């Protein structure tokens, strides 16, 4: 017999071994009967001073525990028909895995390096301020997802099977805790191993992955994709191409625009990173004056406010995390956030961004057509580079100084390894963004007492929240003009994170293999 149960434990009960089983037995009136608990979902309710752990359980009574073995049936595709995939981030990776299941050979081209060699370039940007345009926090094996927080929360529940993506991650080495947690996350220290295991699975079953291989042109005849040019010299015939290059592959957008292949400007969001001592966020969220209980994870938050008909909201909140330099070219400064699996760093950071409507908010950029949002992004990143000191040092300001319009005479400690430079971001940022951010931070301080503090820094700029360009596709997920081209994931404008990109990769693989 299997019964479902919803059980709440206090912080004190959570600390006691066996309390969940005892409370479940009492709730279901099981007495001394034998039973097994399977945790389906675990969450923390910290809305009030008394904190509860909520468990959703399947209770197996008088029967053996169910098998937790996961299996994905990948076929030997070494001699199968090929599907070419451009980009090996989450969208490209899961497109390739789905090809294995469907019996097609994925041939992947990734401009960056494998996950191990990529680390040298991350060290160079952090320590030496040198940006490798082909290998950085955005480009390389696993894409921007590899060296990130690994947050798996998504609202894209109608785009695919979220549980299937989670199970695939566990199958390739992620902790099975992600199948349970309400807000699952893997951690930047754990993700490289998962990415490596996915690569090895693809190669073992006959797929191909070519690193340091950049698509530099498309050969199109009679509105049909016939070939791609690799590294500006090698031509390869293709029939179906899944384009999964990510939201920062600007050269791809510019190439398509130059070839007059249909693109659309897409609304997006830009702003800053705000960084607090983690203890401040813990004290607000957990209602504690000292250190949080060891049973509680580093606290996070989610904030949103409407300011002058535009949303101002938190994005990619990283408790116990780091701010990292996410530039993809020299002469720009871009910041992002990540967390290790234990989320045990001393700081909490989050993007705080403002919605930008490309049709109404940036009229001076109309001349750039579909790339107007992209050009606006570039200008803000160049401004951050100049005001930061013309290195990867980032412009920053104390939060209260930014809101009140004062230059910070000094800055708080930071997790951002290249360093910070005091700059008047309150006057440097366009009013469209800066004015709304200042009002938004005040409102956030009213919602979370203690959030608005001089102990927090804001760091510029958070500009790569999503793609400012949409590569259109029809109901068959194919470009409406160029046959054989399947825009995919964040780069196409169809995803917003690891899980949604992975689901879109699977869908595109199914569409690209149909009829072959």
Image: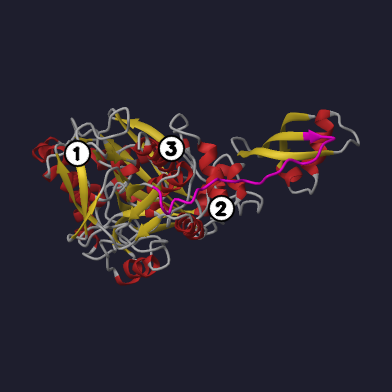
Dot 3 alpha-carbon crowd within 10 angstroms: few under 14, some 14 to 19, many 20 or more: some
Work out whether residue 430 can be spotted: no
Q: Nearer the viewer, residue 77 or 379?
A: 77
Of discs 3 and 1, which sits in the foreground?
1
Q: Are marks 2 and 1 in contact (CB under 8 Å)?
A: no
Q: Position of residue 235 (x, y in %)?
A: 20, 56
Q: Which residue is mark 2?
A: 174
Q: Secondary structure at mark 2?
A: loop
Magenta segment: does it hold 68? Answer: yes
Residue farthest front in this picture:
79
- The alpha-carbon separation of the residues under discs 2 and 3 comes to 29 Å
- The alpha-carbon separation of the residues under discs 2 and 1 comes to 40 Å
Dot 1 alpha-carbon crowd within 10 angstroms: few under 14, some 14 to 19, many 20 or more: some
Q: Position of residue 18 (x, y in %)?
A: 80, 46
Which segment is the magenta one? 60-80
Residue drawn at x 56%, y 47% is 283
> Looking at the image, is mark 2 or mark 3 earlier in the sequence?
2
Q: Which residue is mark 3?
A: 303
Q: Looking at the image, how many numbered discs can be counted on the residues?
A: 3
Q: Nearer the viewer, residue 201 or 144?
A: 201
Quadrant housing the N terminus: top right
> Looking at the image, is mark 2 or mark 1 earlier in the sequence?
2
- Left or right of 340? Residue 289 is right
Quadrant housing the C terminus: top left
Residue drawn at x 33%, y 42% is 490
> Looking at the image, is mark 3 or mark 1 earlier in the sequence?
1
Q: Secondary structure at mark 1?
A: strand
Check residue 224 in the rendering and tell me which mark sits there, or answer none: 1
Work out whether residue 342 can be spotted: yes
Dot 2 alpha-carbon crowd within 10 angstroms: few under 14, some 14 to 19, many 20 or more: many
């Amino acid at each position: 017999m299997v019964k479902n149960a919803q059980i709440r434990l206090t912080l004190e009960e959570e600390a006691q071994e066996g309390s969940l089983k005892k409370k479940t037995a009492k709730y279901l009136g099981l007495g001394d009967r034998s039973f097994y608990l399977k945790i389906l979902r675990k969450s923390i309710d910290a809305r009030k001073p008394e904190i509860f752990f909520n468990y959703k359980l399947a209770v197996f009574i008088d029967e053996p525990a169910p098998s937790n073995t996961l299996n994905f049936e990948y076929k030997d595709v070494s001699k199968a028909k090929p599907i070419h995939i451009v980009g090996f981030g989450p969208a490209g990776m899961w497109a390739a895995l789905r090809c294995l299941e469907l019996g097609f050979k994925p041939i992947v081209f990734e401009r960056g390096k494998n996950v191990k060699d990529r680390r040298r370039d991350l060290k160079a940007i952090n320590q030496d301020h040198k940006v490798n345009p082909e290998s950085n926090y955005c480009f390389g094996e696993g894409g921007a997802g590899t060296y990130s927080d690994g947050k798996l929360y998504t609202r894209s529940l109608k785009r695919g099977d979220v549980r299937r993506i989670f199970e695939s991650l566990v199958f390739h080495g992620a902790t099975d805790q992600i199948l349970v947690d309400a807000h699952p996350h893997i951690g930047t220290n754990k993700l490289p191993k998962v990415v490596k295991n996915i690569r090895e699975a693809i190669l073992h079953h006959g797929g191909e992955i070519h690193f340091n291989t950049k698509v530099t042109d498309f050969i199109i005849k009679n509105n049909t994709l016939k070939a791609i040019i690799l590294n500006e010299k090698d031509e390869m015939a293709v029939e179906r191409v899944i384009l999964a290059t990510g939201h920062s592959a600007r050269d791809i957008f510019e190439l398509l625009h130059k070839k007059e292949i249909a693109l659309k400007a897409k609304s997006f969001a830009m702003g800053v990173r705000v960084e607090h001592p983690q203890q401040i966020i813990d004290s607000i969220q957990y209602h504690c004056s000292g250190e949080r209980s060891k049973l509680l994870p580093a606290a996070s938050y989610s904030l949103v406010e409407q300011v002058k008909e535009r949303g101002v909201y938190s994005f990619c909140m990283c408790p116990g995390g780091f701010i990292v330099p996410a530039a993809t070219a020299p002469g720009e400064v871009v910041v992002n956030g990540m967390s290790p699996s234990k989320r045990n760093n001393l700081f909490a950071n989050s993007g705080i961004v403002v919605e930008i409507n490309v049709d109404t908010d940036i009229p001076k950029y109309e001349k750039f057509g579909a790339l107007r949002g992209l050009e606006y992004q570039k200008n803000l990143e160049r401004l951050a580079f100049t005001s930061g000191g013309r290195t990867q040092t980032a412009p920053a300001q104390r939060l209260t100084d930014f809101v009140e319009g004062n230059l910070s005479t000094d800055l708080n400690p930071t997790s951002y390894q290249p360093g910070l430079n005091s700059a008047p971001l309150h006057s440097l940022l366009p009013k469209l963004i800066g004015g709304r951010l200042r009002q938004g931070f005040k409102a956030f301080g009213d919602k979370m007492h203690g959030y608005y503090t001089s102990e927090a820094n804001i760091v510029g700029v958070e500009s790569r929240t999503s793609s400012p360009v949409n590569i259109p596709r029809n109901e068959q997920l194919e470009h409406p003009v160029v046959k054989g081209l399947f825009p995919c994931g964040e780069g196409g404008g169809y995803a917003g994170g690891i899980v949604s990109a992975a689901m879109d990769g699977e869908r595109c693989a199914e569409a690209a293999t149909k009829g072959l």
